[in-house]
Amino acid sequence: MIAAGALRVIGSELPRDERRAFRTNLRQARASVRPLIVDSNAAKAAAAKLLSEPVPNAVAIKASLARARANDARVRAIVEDRAVDFAATLPQADRHSIANALTSRIRKRDR
């Protein structure tokens, strides 16, 4: 998964104007999925509440977590798609910089 914060870091390799446009694009993408984020958080809170009940309902807890997971995956897909759509409009040298930053982050994470 590439979190929006990671995408911002990857975009930091771009020239200033492209970097600003990239970050604006990410902010707009996150704003467009805000309802999904809110619902995901509500589902997680519901799962936590259900878990703390005297007799936990495992089926309901799993359903709440499944709803949160589905929302989280949808958010990720939308934000990544917007980032890719923007990056595809950049010159090859800038796309190469983004690709290098992405692989560098992967290598650091895998240590």
Image (spheres, rainbow, N blue to C red):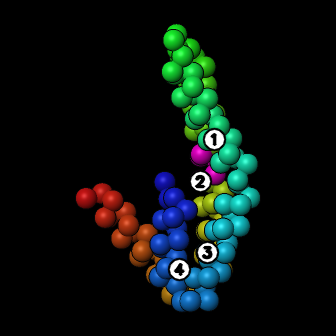
Kind of residue at disc 3 = Arg
Left/right of residue 70 with respect to residue 35 in the rendered view: left
Up the image or down, 64 lies above or below 15; here it is: above
Cα–Cα gap, marks 1 and 4: 32 Å
Determine which residue is flagged by label 1. Answer: 40
**Do tag 1 and tag 3 residues touch (Cβ < 8 Å)?**
no
Q: Quadrant of residue 30?
A: bottom right
Q: Which mark is residue 76?
A: 2
Q: Is residue 34 above or below residue 15?
A: above
Q: Which residues are magenta?
A: 72-76
Q: Residue furthest toward the top? A: 55
Kind of residue at badge 4: Arg
Residue 47's spot in the image, x, y percent? 57, 28
- Label 3 to label 4, Cα distance in Å? 15 Å
The answer to whether residue 63 shows anywhere in this view is yes
Residue 23's disc number: 3
Indicate whether 49 appears above or below 91.
above
Q: Are marks 1 and 4 in contact (CB under 8 Å)?
A: no
State the residue in front, 70 or 46.
46
Q: Provide residue 93's location: percent of width, then percent of height.
A: 51, 87
Q: Is residue 4 left or right of residue 27?
A: left
